[in-house]
Amino acid sequence: MKFCKGESHLNKQELMQLEQLLEQVQKPARYIGGEMNAVQKDWDKVDTTFAFCFPDTYDIAMSHLGMKILYHLINLREDALCERVCMPAADMADLMREKDVPLFSLESRKALNHFDIVGFTLQYEMSFTNILEMLNLGRIPVYAKDRNDTFPIVVAGGPCAFNPEPLAPFIDAFMIGDGEDVMNELIDVIRDGKKQGLTKMNILRNLAKVEGVYVPALYDAAYNEDGTLSSFTPNDPAAPAVVKKRVVKDLSAAVYPDSIPVPYTEIVHDRMVLEIMRGCTRGCRFCQAGMLYRPVRERSMDRLLELADKLQQSTGYEEMSLSSLSSGDFTCLPELISELMKRYKEKRVSVSLPSMRIDNIVKQSLEETQKVKKSGLTLAPEAGTQRLRDVINKGVTEEDLIRAVSDAFESGWSSVKLYFMMGLPTETDEDLQGIGDLARKVVRAYYAMPKEKRTKGVMVTCSASVFVPKPFTPFQWAAQDTIETVHEKQAALRQYLKQKCVNFKWHESHLSMLEACIARGDRRIGDVIYTAWKMGCRLDGWNEHFKFDKWLEAFEKCHLDPAFYAYRERPYEELLPWQFIDAGVSQEYLKRENEKAKAGAITPDCRHGCNGCGLQKWHVCDFVENPPLKDKPHRAEVAN
Amino acid sequence: MKMLVIFEKTPRLRHIGHLDLMRAMQRALRRSGLPIAFSQGFNPHVLLNFAAPLSVGMPGKREIMEVPLDKGVCEGDFKKMISRALPPDLPCIAVRSVDDRHPAPMASLTAACYTAEFEHLPENFADTVSAFLEQKEIPAIRKTKSGMKPCDIRPMIHELAVEGNTLSMTLSLCEKATCKPDLLLSSLFEFAGMERPNALITRQQLLGGDAPNFMPLEML
Ligand code: SF4
């Protein structure tokens, strides 16, 4: 039986086994590849093969923009190919192990250990066990030190790489910052190294010289008696003491896919995505992305329209979404939306805005075309009182919020989702009550409308996640609430939200605690991840697979205390495990912001006046020269 | 006008379900630049009709879909444009233009040919098949819209032959009487007193007309 049109690279027996596995697993369509625009290159015609690994299942992986950008970028090279590899679901992973089928790429069905480079994207701390699982299923030793020259070089990048230490034992090299810039240099160094017959260690030394690359084997960490980091220093002349993040200066000139694989099976976000802007200037103090992706860079209208047309023609998608951390801030948003809607009206392509400001011009253009599904409206006030919103620098006022929901109700929406965080620094019971009050006011805003305008009745869903302090944010020193406190607060909140037309959803506090441990962990956390994985932890982000007791056991076995990582407020003097990385945003700025938070003082959006976050030193930020604005623009954020 | 498109769904894509295949074809048509027709309403979608859904897990050699068009296009141009827009595992084999009054392929469908490729079949399996076909009645339980129903599948088997390790069969496939290859194989191996081995079942051809004068559906 021959199943694949292209030549298959698993051996014949493995392939037969795989075909039988596909008969037995749930949603086999996740493992078949062969999508429109998937790039299938000839292995004999390239120097370097790169496996882009996403440590979660296909439906999540294929919704991720970063993967599409880098997949396209590598495949643009004549001398290299990039194929996709996703985490198999539990049923598939077990069967693969049982029947001895290695983890394989979607395009050529080549086993993971046949690639020159295996690259992981790090989007979420609780997917780290999946990395070990994937390496192991791909017949690659999980510890970097156990991999000799015959194994692929294992690299990683993405937002979680800004604290790479928990994964340091497993990864050969990390890329810090924008991948578009550093990826090609990394591939060049590895390609040249292999051609020259260099050892893995020497290739890694050359990689360490590339700006934005961190090679953990070239650094030593030492600890004080109390468990804190005492020193972190290079042990090799090739390794810089400070690793500087890479920044794409001109987004319009940067590579962006004009064609992306179109999945057959349904995925989380099944549409084409146009990244209009990178970075955010609002400066919410809990938000890691807002700090990591600075400075703000916009893509030009011309480039966006060119990309939109090409993407539409190459994918045939019926929906296009604009993406960025706060699309409402994009300078030419109204013009862009009306132009896109004009172009795609006839082609029946709808345009959606995942995160936007309710702004009259936008509202008008939405009403004109009637293209927006009036199902759900999402707002993120994050905290229940103005005091706490000032602490976190979330510049939304109650007035903004009520105006935004009233507007939405008037134009036909009837269900609203409100996102909150609990356990934010300085939070008290009053702030939790504030969440209840806000929900009540939103319901009231609905009933304030004349009867004939009300549709089917209002539903307000309040969702409260647990605050996780993250590196490179002003709250990177903060203590997380203990699980007990979180449970008490959840119980209180449940009471405050026992209201008509209001629904309450809360998050698993155990998962958030581990997320906090790993997010701000040091090298030793690597052993905890390994031990947890050995005890069967994987797919931790999935409720049905999360085994909290096993994780606690893993901490114990490694003689580490989760409380040390999650619940301890760290003093400014402490050497932080990620401090050797220069993310552009300076530690001084973060301290300053943390102090302002304690004082409840807000910091205005730096689009209207530089706040000196540290990036000005690199001369990459367009807003440094901008004069401060007198009127604060209104800031309610809306997502659909 | 309407275009009948004959395409293959390769074994690689056999796990793609019917709705997923439909979405893939709609997107291909959107990519093609052809003058396709859309449904009315809030969420307009590309109009197309398949002659018969393929079961999940089954490849099809000559599947048929009907595509209504807003403007006339010649067969050659259509084939060129749709071929460019289709992924390699859903190649277009042929097209035929028909006018709007041409009956929908689904309405003319009566039967289909399948093959089942086995790893290994016993040497005298052809004799077993002949004996199987000599039965006057072959009782089986058929899954229908209104539940499981006992029926006689003998009249729905129009052809059954062995060649090497491949079994080919022509079975009824229409509203009134459908015998799925799966049902046939179960009943055949039960008759043979054997455990049913794994096989790759492929739908080879959709048929119209009446037994024994079946015709390829796309030619009707
Ligand atoms: S350098 Fe100034 S303007 Fe630029 S992101 Fe930092 S604070 Fe904002």
Image: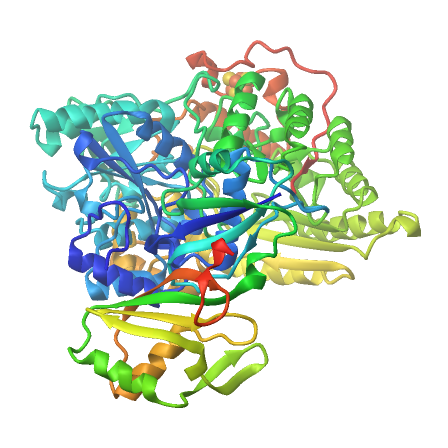
Check the picture and name the quadrant holding the C terminus of chain A: top right
Q: Position of residue A377 (x, y in %)?
A: 69, 45
Instruction: Please tell me which residue lies in front, A298 or A268.
Output: A268
B154 lies left or right of A188: right
Whole-percent x, y for residue A467 in the image: 53, 47
Query: Is any atom of residue A277 visible in this view?
Result: yes
Q: Quadrant of residue A394?
A: top right
Where's the N terminus of chain A, which quadrant? bottom left
Is residue B41 placed above or below A92 in the rendered structure?
above
Q: Is residue A248 left or right of residue A400?
A: left
Colour scheme employed for the rendering of this structure: rainbow
Residue drawn at x 53%, y 40% as measured from the top left: B29
Q: How many marks?
A: 0
Q: Nearer the viewer, residue B130 or B8?
A: B130
Q: Residue at 30% x, 60% y: name it.
A: A93
Image position of B119 with respect to A262: above or below: below
A538 or A559, nearer to the observer:
A538
Q: Position of residue A212 (x, y in %)?
A: 31, 24
Q: Which residue is at 57% across, 45% downward? A: A424
Instruction: Left or right? Give the position of A420 relative to A202.
Output: right
Evaluate whether residue A286 shows in this view. no
Which percent across, then down, holds residue A388? Answer: 65, 40
Q: Residue furthest front?
A: B213
Q: Nearer the viewer, residue A71 or A483?
A: A71
